[in-house]
Image: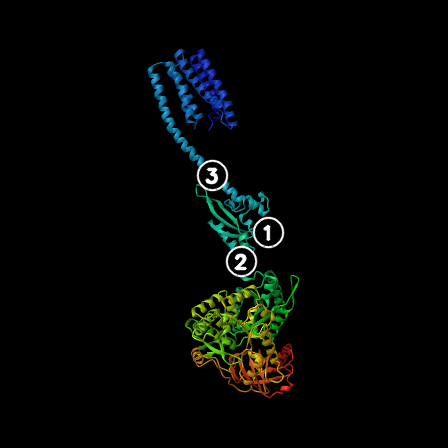
Amino acid sequence: MHVLPIDWWQLAILVTGALAIGIIFTAALPPWPVMVSVAASLIGCFVARNAAKRERIREESNLTLSAIAWATIVIPMIGIGFSHAYWVMYSDLAWPWALAGLVCAGALAGSLLSGRIVQQFVAQFCCWFPAAILEGSNTSYLGISVAAIAMVVVGYRQSIIVEKRREKVQARERERNRAEDILRDYEETGQGWFWETDRRGNVTYLSPSVISVLDRAEDDVIGSDFVDLFELGVGNSEGERTLTFHLSSRSSFQELGVKAATSGEERWWSVNGRPAYDNFHNFVGFRGSGTDLTEKKRSEENVNRLAQFDSLTGLANRFQMQQTLEKILNAPHLHHRECSLFLLDLDRFKQVNDTLGHPAGDALLKQVSQRLLRAVGDDGRVGRVGGDEFEVIIPGRTERERLAQIAQEIIYSLSQPYSIEGQRVIIGASVGIATAPQDGTTSDMIVRNADLALYAAKDGGRGRHHFYSNDLLSAAEERSKLEEDLRDAVAHGGFELYYQPVVNAQDETIAGFEALLRWNHPQRGWMSPAKFIPIAEDIGLINAIGEWAIRTACDNMARWPENIRCAVNVSPLQFANPQLPAIVTNAIAHARIDPARLELEITESVFLSDDEGTDAMFASLKRVGVRLALDDFGTGYSSLGYLKKAPFDKIKIDQSFVRGATEPGSRNGALITSITSLAKSLGMDTTAEGVETMDELELVHNLGCSHVQGYIYSKPLPGDEVFDQLSNGLQLDAKGPRSARAPRQTMLRKVVLSHDGQFYDANIRNIASGGAMIVGLWNVPPGTEFTIALSESLIVKATTIWSEDERMGVQFAEPIDMDKVEFRKRASVLDRQAHDLAGMGG
């Protein structure tokens, strides 16, 4: 605070007036000391005027200026006190007039120095001090001293009060300034804005940021109707009713969403408001605030879009397709509940992702979605339900032939070449079809059944469509139950190992055994491994089963002669397990057997990945010391490169080469000869599997096989019978028929079967003039009739006479001439055969 108030010079008016009044009442001029003191007071007052201005010009502290300012307070007040006291004591001025002048001077000084406690008391003391000095008595001195002390005490207390009051004022000022700054920043940054109206609803204040958004002049906005700032009638009827109601009823409202009346970009605001009243409780208008909802609105729209549509392809997503399907199935009228659901899965899409990368896969999915939309057209709705799976919903009743036509058009369209990043890409599609209400009355049932039909289409060779039928559900339920039973068998030790002897071809002594997994199902009895092993692989139980088999085989070997080996089959999934060497090592150590007695049989499918992990696994197993055998050689992805890289000790010749090798014109013997010659050159043993007749035994012996395995020597034996067999010696005698049934031709041939309008792919393993054995269809009831395309020119009718697992024997309606059957035709003719079967109507 400055020392001097800006109007301190006005004290000169009192000095001049007091002098004039004194001259009038005394009718004479005052003594010259009075005139000198009056002149000094007037000079001090006029100097104070200049000093007060200089104080406000200078920001920095200046001691000289402060001293001058204090002097302009002290000198005029001493002059006033001295002039009045001297005039009374040494001239004709009466004391009452002098006291009146001193009191007026003190009052004026106190008023001009308001808020400056120290200056006030200094001025009062200087005003009365000269009178006490001139009077000269002890009483005067005592009185002025007491007055000075009292003024100091009162001044100190008053200064405390003033300081507290000043602090409160400054705090309120800072708070007000801070609030103003915050609100100003709030407006300027666009986070929000403020508005005010008068009692008639006209705008009296609106934040500049909002005025700029409205693209209107401020004069046009101020004074306009508040509701004119919004487009309340355009898709915002709810906001119009709510805002109008609150304004008319003078009630508060919160976060009311309204659309701004902008000419350019669409903007949305959230508006808050409350009525305002004056001190007499009269309504004076509304005051409120607002925030920009535009980005929030866009985010909500984007979220809603993502919730309804696939972000990559723009098609309806799983949620929306589910809603569409449920809406149809829950229609009020029964005839409106009919629809068909296509479930599509792309074939070979994973290969595109793996070779070209996921961006290429995404580009492919976009093209697929466009082709799907064109293929389906106005017939239905297309959606992507995840990954490479799509759905098509066709409302209403559609004939089965039309559904098949649409499915074929979809498959044909999606199977045409694509251009992705300059590369030609070809994929396929499989389609499963379910209809409502025939195949289900709820969305879950329809989707499940379409999924079952899709799996049937994929199992049938891919690139085809398949309608749902009840047998698919039965098969799925059977598999689900079988999965549960498999888990129970693993948990409670429901498996057994049977051992089939492997015999030295030279001396017919037992060289070892192959451990074969068996499962005696509690309800179904003995089940073929070909049926439950693939399921165990699918549900992740194969590692546990394989580990149990290795440990059990090793424990049993510990009871056998030390020169007897045991072979255990290893699944490709088990082979890929990094813990396999440790499992094998632990099993061997626990049984305390020579590692070379354990032989692991591995199929060629482990080489499909052909990576460093495969080579590392072979190296780890050989370090353990076990033997490795290549199982089913020649039936899979055979390559001599495998034999060059992998450290195999034995090659097992599949039984498909052994059977029929003795028949005239068979090439199997030449293949067996080449395999045994190759094995001998590489220092490997050979085992001929599936030898069942004496002529087959003689053949494989003559062709150089080192070991023989098959029913000609023994069927697979339980573990206790193996111990008994070994106790009786290692020699085995061959027992079996001289030759196999004659007029049969062994083959592995793909054929197409038709039954009740459904088509099935299968394989013929052997055929005669009156019937054939077909592999690929599970548990077909005896008596089931089929139409079979054996070749391009031969289509026959047949009836199932027996069935076991995936194999069945059929009897032809009429015998065929084996010499006229063109079995060497290429498999590509089967497409035309399927067409012929369809024309025959089953």
The amino acid pointed to by label 1 is: Glu
Report the Cα–Cα distance between label 1 and label 3: 36 Å
Report the number of discs.
3
Q: Which residue is mark 2?
A: 303
Task: Out of 730 and 185, give the one closest to the viewer.
Answer: 730
Q: Depth check: 49 or 600 in front?
A: 600
User: Which image quarter: residue 320?
Assistant: bottom right
Query: Above or below — where is 720 with respect to 366?
Result: below
Q: Secondary structure at mark 3?
A: helix
Circle 1/circle 2 CB separation < 8 Å: no
The C terminus, quarter of image:
bottom right
The reply to whether residue 821 is in sight is yes
User: Compared to 694, does 53 lie above or below?
Assistant: above
Q: Earlier in the sequence, mark 1 or mark 2?
A: 1
SS for tag 1?
Answer: loop
Coloration mode: rainbow
Residue 833 versus residue 255 in the image, above or below:
below
Label number found at residue 176: 3
Q: Give residue 404's position: percent from left, percent from top.
A: 60, 74
The percent coordinates of residue 234 (x first, y second) are: 56, 55
Mark drawn on residue 461: none
Front residue of this view, candidates 117 and 808: 808
Report the Cα–Cα distance between label 2 and label 3. Answer: 42 Å
Task: Identify the mark nearer the N-term, 2 or 3.
Answer: 3
Amino acid type, label 2: Val
The answer for how far apart the CA atoms under marks 1 and 2 are is 21 Å
* Neighbour tally class for label 2: few under 14, some 14-19, many 20 plus, Cα within 10 Å: few
Amino acid at circle 3? Arg
Which residue carries the number 1 mark? 265
Between 499 and 452, the one lying in front of the other is: 499
Near mark 3 (Cα within 10 A), the count class, few <14, some 14-19 or many ≥20, is few
Decide which of tag 1 and tag 3 comes sooner along the chain.
3
